[in-house]
Amino acid sequence: MKPPTAAQRRIVEAADPQTGRLSGTEAQLQALVRARLAFRHPRPPHACFLTPAGHRVRDEGPAPAQPSPEPPPPAPAPASSGVFAARTGTETEPTGPEGPARAREVRSAWEGLVELRRMTNPDGTRDRPCAWERTHLVQAAALALETAGRVPAGPDREGYRVSPTPQPEAVAVREPTADGIRACAAALERAGWQTSEHAERRGGGRYVLASPRRV
């Protein structure tokens, strides 16, 4: 990982001492996210906070003056980019980039969510869902599945579908094959969810009922 520039260090050092929240232009904050010194909160207004690496940079204090000039600011993000959205497999509109670009978005969002767990869970644990996940069940479960490499359903492909249920703190996950259902359950359990498999009332199919683990 490249060392932060002098400008980036100034932004990191000016972070809120209690929460690690950062202030700066969108281009500056995005550069810190790409450098893994910051993560973007998944809830509006999508503020940026220091990652553990960012906290280490701040704790190191100011860097010695460098004789070389600072590099120019990074180019702005393309106009097509927007706020990250987990794919539930129920979308009816185009869902943005695919391939490596999407994989990077998913990885960054998951790292941000894990850091949010550390910051907001009372014991600081990263392996158990946090309050945000309990109020955004479908999106949180979908992100865990996509992070694990599961493929969401789409107009031209089969895959997982995550949907809400009448039960509190529970979502239903469906896949077209039994192996797919079991793989989804395993992925959610690794992400800190508890799961159980059930039979559909009609059609004889199977689905997974999943809820965030509390202990």
Image: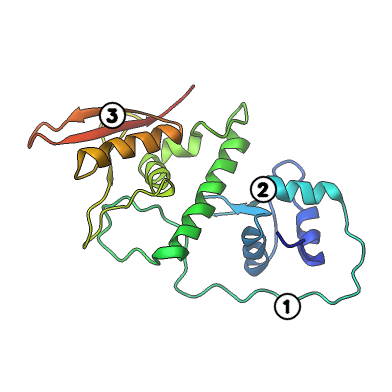
Q: Amino acid at mark 1?
A: Pro
At x 23%, y 43%, the residue is 175
Q: Is residue 52 left or right of residue 96?
A: right
Residue picked out by circle 1: 72
Q: Amino acid at mark 2?
A: Thr
Q: Residues within 10 Å of mark 3 (few under 14, many from 20)?
A: few
Q: Amino acid at mark 3?
A: Gln
Q: Is residue 3 left or right of residue 75?
A: right
**Residue 167, label in figure:** 3
Q: Say which element carries label 3.
A: loop
At x 42%, y 38%, the residue is 135
Q: Are marks 3 and 1 in contact (CB under 8 Å)?
A: no
At x 65%, y 62%, the residue is 29
Residue picked out by circle 2: 51
Instruction: Using the image, determine if residue 40 lies above or below residue 138.
Output: below
Instruction: Using the image, determine if residue 37 lies above or below residue 65.
Output: above
In this view, the mark in front (3 or 1) = 1
Nearer to me, 134 or 57 = 57
